[in-house]
Amino acid sequence: MERYIPLLVLLCLWQALCSFGIVASYVLPSPIEIAIGFWDLLTVGMPPGHLLYYHILYSLYRVSLGFSVACVLGVPLGLLMGWSPRFHNLFSPIIEIVRPVPPLAWIPIAIVWLGIGIKSSAFIIFLGAFFPILLNTASGVLAINPILIDAARTLNATQRDIFFKVLVPGSLPSIFVGMRVGMGVAWMTLVAAEFSGVKEGYGLGFMIMTARDIQRPDEILAGMLVIGVIGFAVDWLFRTWESRIRLWG
Amino acid sequence: MNTVHLELVRIGKTFLDEKLGMETCAIAQIDLKIEKGQFVSFVGPSGCGKSTLLRIISGLENSFEGEVFLDGKRILKPHNEVGLVFQQYALFPWRTMCENIEMGLEIMGMGKTERRAVAKEYIRLFGMEGFEHLYPCQLSGGMQQRVAIARTLIMNPKVVMMDEPFGSLDSQTRNDMQEFLMDLRQKRNDTVLFVTHNVDEAVFLSDQIVVLSKRPARILRIFEINCSRPRDRTSKEANDIRREVIGILRRERMDTSPVGS
Ligand SMILES: Nc1ncnc2c1ncn2[C@@H]1O[C@H](COP(=O)(O)OP(=O)(O)OP(=O)(O)O)[C@@H](O)[C@H]1O
Ligand SMILES: [Mg+2]
């Protein structure tokens, strides 16, 4: 419990600064105001009528779409790149060129290609999540002790057996690392992608931009908190899932 | 009984480091005939090419000189008729003990209940009941080694090769494992090729000891040991052979003629 004391002290100090008017509430709303802002997001919505609950669902929907595509392409491609030096050789130039471009720099062209809407935001999220997943998976395969492949071969393993019974399970820990990093990037990218507009009128990024437009810093901060908490919860889900699957040391 | 089972014909191996353009000759030339059911130990200085020799016999190396024949058929690629227990156990960390032992049967396409039953048998034979659902990292070194041996023996290979299997065990566990291996052999009569640094161990276990030179490896001498089993580690015959092998190895170490010439 000791570890929460500094946080509590900070919150009290913050509240005091605001209550005594030392910091103006249009610059930094007090914790209590933020809590009320959160309540407003839940009950009134931002813009009014657009409830927090729906913003969360839309954001999660966009992330899941982009992230799933990143997994579906990134994991097999990463496995292949780790497995076959030839494949690695053929694809790494493309990857090395595309990867350093920040996902957000793709927003304008994504909007030109796909229009404003779920497709373009999912595409941006995909770009953010894809590379960590791909590269972690590939390096996970490369890190497998070659002796294990030899051991499988002495047991008559075919290339197919080696792929599915050695490379896939052997790189699983790295695949999880890739997915967790990828999810983190996806979540960051999502909010930025939603800043630049959404068609449906929902999304956490869109919500806090709207709150800014109508001068509600309390709701901006409450929204930021929600984004952080969901990001944490998603990461926790991944860690739990991993500990269910990965039972070895 | 006295027919040649495994035959090594003019085996040689040179490693080529393409980056450095450097050649390392690991094995000079080895000719050897091994009969069925023999327990043959290889002893030799560290780094002389013992592991490389076993890898060649198992079919894992794809470029080497000479030929390996098993029952007259050439070995060209890994096959489960030739089992290899690796120097570094090489257990699959993501598989439980039971799943490690079953790996070969699983690859063969045997059904789950069937192979589990066979694995259970081996787990009992190796005295490892109660640990079958643990992962390798949760097992002691001695137990990991037994899992590695069981994983190889379950395939009933014609030739079982073990690369310094007890090298990293403490001396008590090591003795226990040697006794265990001898008991096992009474039951199964496998043909075994056994690499070790430990001359005592070789004398205790083997029908034949092949003494190798330092790198590049060639055969310096072959000892036949005909003492009855179970063997007394301190008997006179054992001591005589031990002294002689150690003498050869010491002379080999002292000899400072350039390596690879
Ligand atoms: N893949 C490789 N590439 C290049 N050189 C190698 C390779 N594998 C082994 N060697 C070299 O070949 C020689 C023999 O190696 P090997 O592992 O067969 O020796 P060893 O007798 O098993 O040694 P130890 O007793 O330490 O286990 C060593 O000098 C080693 O450096
Ligand atoms: Mg070795």
Image: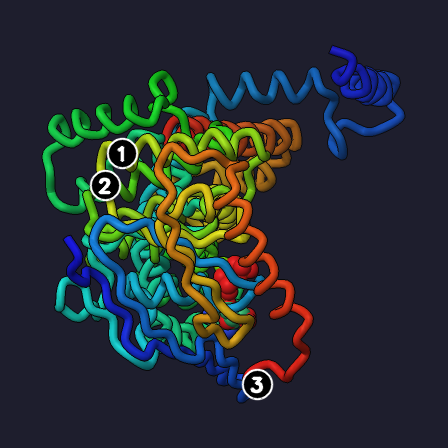
Quick check: A224 left or right of B6? right
Tell me the subunit letter for badge 1: B
Quick check: A149 left or right of A226? left
Q: Position of residue B10 (x, y in %)?
A: 32, 79
Which residue is more in the foreground, A186 or B212?
A: B212
In the image, are marks 1 and 2 on the same chain?
A: yes
* A190 up-or-down from A99: above or below: above
Q: For mark 3, does the 10 Å Cα neighbourhood hold few (<14), some (14 to 19), or many (20 or more) residues?
A: few
Q: Quadrant of residue A247?
A: top left
Residue at the farthest top position: A1
Of the numbered discs 3 and 1, the one sitting upstream in the chain is 3
- Tag 1's secondary structure? helix
Amino acid type, mark 2: Asn
* Residue A82 at least partly seen: yes
* A62 up-or-down from A193: above or below: above
Q: For mark 1, does the 10 Å Cα neighbourhood hold few (<14), some (14 to 19), or many (20 or more) residues?
A: few
* B152 up-or-down from B252: above or below: above
* A223 up-or-down from A173: above or below: above
Which residue is more in the foreground, B177 or A179?
A: B177
Q: Position of residue B85 (x, y in %)?
A: 37, 48
The disc placed on residue B20 is: 3
As measured in the structure, the alpha-carbon distance from the residue carrying label 1 to the one carrying label 2 is 6 Å
Q: How many discs appear?
A: 3
Q: Position of residue B95 (x, y in %)?
A: 35, 35
Amino acid type, mark 3: Leu
- Tag 2's secondary structure? loop
Of the numbered discs 2 and 3, the one sitting upstream in the chain is 3
Label 2 near label 1: C-beta < 8 Å? yes
Q: For mark 2, does the 10 Å Cα neighbourhood hold few (<14), some (14 to 19), or many (20 or more) residues?
A: some
Q: Residue at label 1?
A: B186
